[in-house]
Amino acid sequence: MSSYHTNTSQTEALYKEKGSKFYAFAHPVNSEADIKTIQEAYRKQFYDARHHCFAWILGLGEQQWRANDDGEPAHSAGDPILGQIKAHGLTNTLVIVIRYFGGTKLGVGGLIQAYKTATEMALSKAQILEIFEMIEVRLAFSYEMLSQAERLVTDYDIEVKERDYQETCVISGRLKKDLLERFKEKTADLYSITIDIGNDSE
């Protein structure tokens, strides 16, 4: 996977079922520290709620994830929340669903549907951003090759971080990883431009 999607701002929704209220909150996150901070804030704000269920995914290719039922029957809350994050193709995303019990038991099937629906309602409001996995690149060349180097920057949508036009000109930036093989093929015979490929970056 060379790109991923994440929600760019907090969204929320309220789903009601047989007196129970399910408050769903979706957040973009970058680390487990972010997740912990957000969870603590909601536990303080909704201190009287019976359940604070959640799920999250971090990293490309679902590198890290967790789902928690917080006292609900096993797999009736965290898994449906996680399933909706995956269904929307998102990562670096946390969803917390807070339940206030309404006096009528919903059963495992009813809980699964309620947590799934609340999460879907919150995520459907999210503004989705595609983030590409990037590779560091460095182009070194003589001034006479400046126009050709700049053409590479334009043609391959290189995100320039620095231009240094001294005796030896250097352009440093980031290339989308899914363009790397085409970029290598294009520059393989360009002996007048030295190409260095660096590490992955976010």
Image (tube, grey):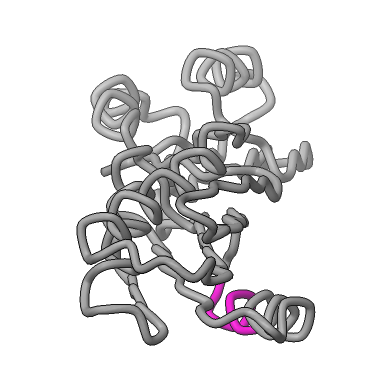
The residue at 30%/40% (across/down) is 87
**Figure quadrant of residue 168:** top right
The residue at 56%/33% (across/down) is 128
In the image, residue 78 sits, relative to residue 14, either above or below, namely below
Q: Nearer the viewer, residue 76 or 180?
A: 76
| Relative to 48, 179 lies left or right | left
| Magenta stretch: helix, strand or loop mostly | helix
Q: Nearer the viewer, residue 56 or 91?
A: 56
Q: Position of residue 105 (x, y in %)?
A: 35, 68
The residue at 62%/19% (across/down) is 150
Q: How many marks?
A: 0
Q: Position of residue 3 (x, y in %)?
A: 38, 40
Q: Position of residue 200 (x, y in %)?
A: 41, 57
Q: Nearer the viewer, residue 44 or 89?
A: 44
Q: Nearer the viewer, residue 127 or 63?
A: 127
The residue at 24%/24% (across/down) is 185
Region in magenta = 31-36
Q: Position of residue 136 (x, y in %)?
A: 49, 50
Tell me, yes or no, whether the highlighted magenta stretch contains residue 18. Answer: no
In the image, residue 175 sits, relative to residue 113, either above or below, namely above
Quarter of the N terminus within the rendering: top left
In the image, residue 20 sits, relative to residue 192, either above or below, namely below
| Relative to 39, 183 lies left or right | left
| Relative to 80, 37 lies left or right | right
